[in-house]
Amino acid sequence: MDIFAHALWTYAIFHKQKYKWWGAFFGILPDILSFGPFFVYYHLILGNNFKNHLINDSVFVMYNITHSLVIFTIFVITVYYITRKIPWLMFGWGMHILIDIPTHTKDFFPTPFLWPLFSLKINGISWGEPWFMIINYSLLIIVYSWIIYKKYKIKNFKALHIL
């Protein structure tokens, strides 16, 4: 899925949390860590267009690490062990992986969700297909409309209740 949709979906999930922006941040972190350095180097410094054959091995290594439920689980357990609190907002990262599994094809960055234990990758649908983008963003519009409606309705209810 595209990075903007990841941010919007994770923000929608965490919208009632105090630190909701951290949930959205963790929702895009796997792609930032995987593609961020590549994007900066090739697009901003060299000015090249994004092409598969230009992607160096470090992108694939970081993609395996950041898109693995195994690695995600190790990080969550480590943070829990250190803080003795469940790092709920880190679950934006896990949600990112779960969304990517069915929305990536084997031809373009299939999600290595069980790496390094297994090399299983699902041949899903391409998130870049126009029909999928229309459905995905239509669902996001519906979800955010509902969130805004509920927020507005609750505020009015509280205001009326006080009167």
Image (spheres, grey):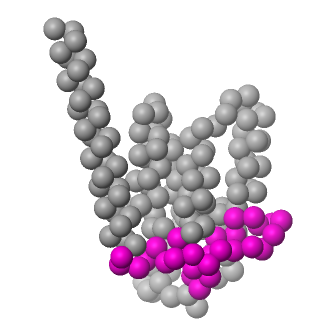
Expressed as whole percent of the image width and height from the top left, the position of residue 88 reads 60, 38
Residue 158 falls left or right of residue 66: left
105 lies above or below 88: below
Q: Position of residue 120 (x, y in %)?
A: 75, 73
Q: Is residue 41 visible?
A: no
Q: Nearer the viewer, residue 4 or 48?
A: 4
Main secondary-structure element of the magenta-colored stretch: loop
Residue at the (46%, 44%) spot, across then down:
13
The spot of residue 147 in percent (x, y) is: 32, 41
Q: Which residues are magenta?
A: 103-131
- The residue located at (29%, 34%) in the rendering is 150
Q: Position of residue 154 (x, y in %)?
A: 27, 26
Residue 36 magenta: no
Residue 91 located left or right of residue 112:
left
Residue that lies at the very extreme toward the top in this rendered image: 163
Residue at image x 49%, y 78%? 126
Q: Quadrant of residue 99?
A: bottom right
Q: How many marks?
A: 0
Image position of 163 with respect to 84: above or below: above
Q: Which is nearer the eye, 88 or 59?
A: 88
Q: Is the residue 126 above or below the residue 95 in the image?
A: below
Residue at the bottom extreme?
Answer: 53
Relative horizontal placement of residue 119, taking residue 26 as reference (left or right): right
From where the camera sits, is residue 102 visible? yes
- Dividing the image into 4 quarters, which one contains the C terminus? top left
Q: Quadrant of residue 2?
A: bottom left
